[in-house]
Amino acid sequence: MIIAMRCFSCGKPVSHLHEKYLKELEKGKKPKEVMDKLGLERYCCRALFLGHVELLDTVARFKRS
């Protein structure tokens, strides 16, 4: 769905970095390089970004009126 505001494990605010992360990936950079640049050092924060799947469009198709 939408990226979490904070990391579930350590509580670090991460949602403000998600847009920058996606823009850098579109430029062709590797996820490791981008996360290093953004300051995501802990494995729990990295896992949050790597495991995120955007499902908003899928869920929106089933919206009840």
Image (cartoon, rainbow, N blue to C red):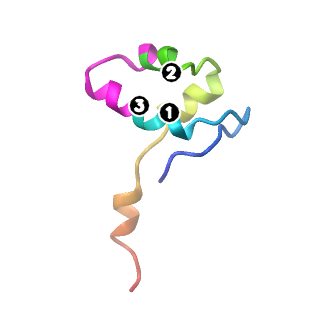
Q: Secondary structure at mark 1?
A: helix
Q: Earlier in the sequence, mark 3 or mark 2?
A: 3
52 versus 47 height, above or below? below
Q: Secondary structure at mark 3?
A: helix
Amino acid type at mark 1? Leu
Q: Which residue is mark 2?
A: 38
18 versus 35 height, above or below? below
Q: Secondary structure at mark 2?
A: helix
Cα separation between marks 3 and 1: 5 Å
* Image side of residue 30 versus residue 42, left or right: left
Report the disc number at residue 65. Answer: none
Give x and y (percent) for residue 44: 64, 28
Q: Residues within 10 Å of mark 2 (few under 14, many from 20)?
A: some
Label 3–label 1 contact, CB within 8 A: yes
Magenta part of the chain: 21-33
Q: Which residue is mark 1?
A: 17
